[in-house]
Image (cartoon, rainbow, N blue to C red):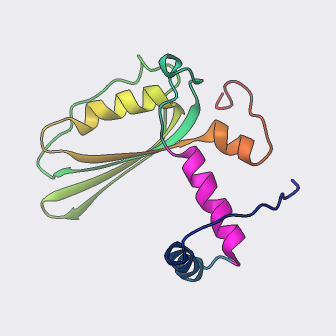
Amino acid sequence: MSLLRFGVAMEKELVDQLDRFVCQEGFANRSEALRSLVRRALTEERPNTPESGGPVALSGGVLTLVYPAQQKLDRVPTAPYSSLHIQANLQLHVDPTSVLKILVLRGKAVEIRDWSNHLIRQKGVVGNLGLMDTTTLAQSFGKNPPEDSHE
């Protein structure tokens, strides 16, 4: 993929923060850091449902849940979510009173979000969902994935 040069104007304070970020994160230069930040911004969760005029993007997600050790989570069936796949499931007791559960998910963003919200909304659960629009990510690398690249 060829690179295109362009100028960016920023306040000095913002450039100073960018330079600190470059050093702290170990990027070779500002350009590498900016490319990484732009990719992240373009692939993070955002509305992409048919109602918003965008495609229903294929996504990867990480659902993190923390809940009391004595609590059993209600089961949330995946069958109603045809594109949803649980790729990995890690559960561990972080201390005698708390459980940390991490689920790696793939499917359509709208289905991942809806299914995950059923778990997050359970009493006693603290949860966070991070979604990455893998369709946009592939396009940023110059590739066009098939309509359902997960199958």
Residue 27 image-quadrant placement: bottom right
Residue 43 in magenta?
Answer: yes
3 left or right of 30 in image: right
At 72% from the left edge and 46% from the top edge, which residue is drawn? 140
Number of numbered discs present? 0
Q: 108 or 69: which is nearer to us?
A: 108
Question: Above or below — where is 99 with respect to 54?
Answer: below
At 35% from the left edge and 35% from the top edge, which residue is drawn? 116
Q: Residue 4: x and y, percent? A: 83, 57
Question: Above or below — where is 24 with respect to 38?
Answer: below
71 left or right of 103 in image: left
At 30% from the left edge and 33% from the top edge, which residue is drawn? 117
**Stretch in magenta:** 28-44
Residue 9 image-quadrant placement: bottom right
Q: 118 or 52: which is nearer to us?
A: 52
Q: Residue 14: x and y, percent? A: 52, 72
Question: Above or below — where is 150 with respect to 40?
Answer: above
Residue 30 in magenta?
Answer: yes
Residue 151 image-quadrant placement: top right
Question: Above or below — where is 28 with respect to 44?
Answer: below
Q: Main secondary structure of the magenta part?
A: helix
At 59% from the left edge and 32% from the top edge, which residue is drawn? 58
Q: Residue 81: x and y, percent? A: 44, 20
